Image: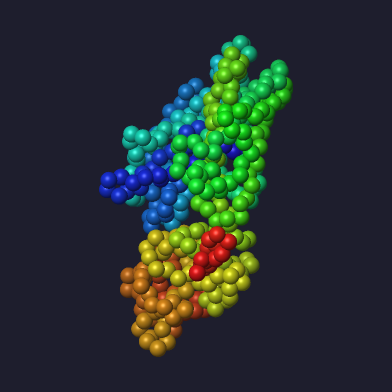
Amino acid sequence: MLGTLFVSVLGVTNEGEPVVEWRADQVTIYDNEKHAVLYLGVDEPGSFDVTIELLSYGVGLDIARDVIIPDTAIIPAGKCKGSVNVSVADEAVGGGSENGYRKLRIRLNEVIEGKAAIGDYGFIGIMDVNILGHSTSGTGCRSGSLRTSRVVVSEADGAAVLTFIVNEPLPHDIVLGYRVDLEWTGTASHAQHEIDYVYSVEHHRGGVFKNVILRAGDTSVDIRIDIIDDDEPENTEQFIVHLEHGHLSSALTMLSDSVIVDIEDNDRCPGPLQYEYYDGSCYFKVSLPGEPALKAADASELCLQHDGHLAIITGGMENTIVGGTADNREAWIGAIRDQDNMDTFIWFDGSPLVYDSWRQREPNNLRGNEDCVKTNHVRLGLWNDTPCRDRSVRIAVCEKPAVTRGHPQP
């Protein structure tokens, strides 16, 4: 199982730049798993890559010898998320320490490319990767931790499954108490709002803990928190789970004892495809099986089959999201040449272009029949007029109205 961590841009500087910070502060793996995947995220995608310099140092680890970690992290243009792979070197597997864990500490040092900034006071700039191995102390003390301090689940999953692990099996059962807090003060979007009860989560109130048992000889136990889908479109909601472990302090060094759970909505953009939500619309990518050349007319038909239409773009952020939905590949959008005014482009529904993002020297109607438009030409979000049978285009970006309170938006 891979360790997972999320990084997010949660604010802006005085200059209006988004601020990069670690969204969670710990992830824990066994050394023989060898890999941890660290995810970076931003609230809104940008038109250019954001590259962040990373500085790393180890506790019980030799950075140059024991781990493999890149010097930079990248959030790609048009995306809200990037990833960094951290690996434990073969020579470091099976290594030990007094309490059975070693630590890799990673600092966000500076943004070296793109529009973003590193936060200072009040932002999390350092995170820990805990690497569990064997204990060398001979005292019988173990180390234990939740896998990560933040997880993301969908309403459709029906549950959040949180895994607690120890570096070595214990000779006897241990009881772990846990408590679900729906109204913790660390978020404005908690799972139980003061006005609107959004989610029902299995929990006990008043500080009462439920229990799970880590059996003798085992090294992990799952904590299952059931989530009931409310069938209503909502923003991402959160709750937090705390472990009660004071009675274990003599036998267990606890590394991470709480986890934030993000519940992602599955009702705003229902359907079988991957969707990007923005400002009342759901955007999705379509192609023919095997991704052969796709004519614009066939792209429009594919959109209709999924209750949508080719994307209509009215602003810069929407243009970036459409380009990112296409994974920065050339894709059809819904602009066409106005047959009543051949020097003008309109949207397929007859509405005018109130926004455009033409590449330099475009549109040029180079072949005399360039009546359709593709995006991501040369660079993310740049448009080009092209023949409607352009064989270089293999995908399209569609748009459909999001659902609000049981009904699609008009």
| Name of the residue lying farthest toward the front | 195
Residue 15 vs residue 186: left or right? left
| Name of the residue lying farthest toward the left | 15
> Who's the residue at 49% across and 21% down the image?
60
Residue 355 vs residue 203: left or right? left
Q: Quadrant of the N terminus?
A: top right
- Which color scheme is applied? rainbow
| Name of the residue lying farthest toward the top | 139
Residue 14's quadrant in the figure?
Answer: top left
Above or below, 45 against 69 in this view is below
Residue 308 vs residue 106: left or right? right
> Who's the residue at 65% across and 41% down the image?
226
Of 322 and 241, nearer the camera is 241
Where does residue 300 sit, x and y in percent of width and height?
55, 75
Q: How many discs mark residues in the rendered view?
A: 0
> Who's the residue at 45% across and 43% down the image?
188
- Residue 262 visible in rendering: no
Where does residue 163 sit, x and y in percent of width and height?
63, 33
- Residue 120 visible in rendering: yes
Of 59 and 28, nearer the camera is 28
Of 148 and 351, nearer the camera is 351
Where does residue 397 sit, x and y in percent of width and height?
51, 67
Where does residue 123 sit, x and y in percent of width and height?
38, 36
Above or below, 48 against 358 in this view is above
> Who's the residue at 55% across and 28% down the image?
257
Residue 382's quadrant in the figure?
Answer: bottom left
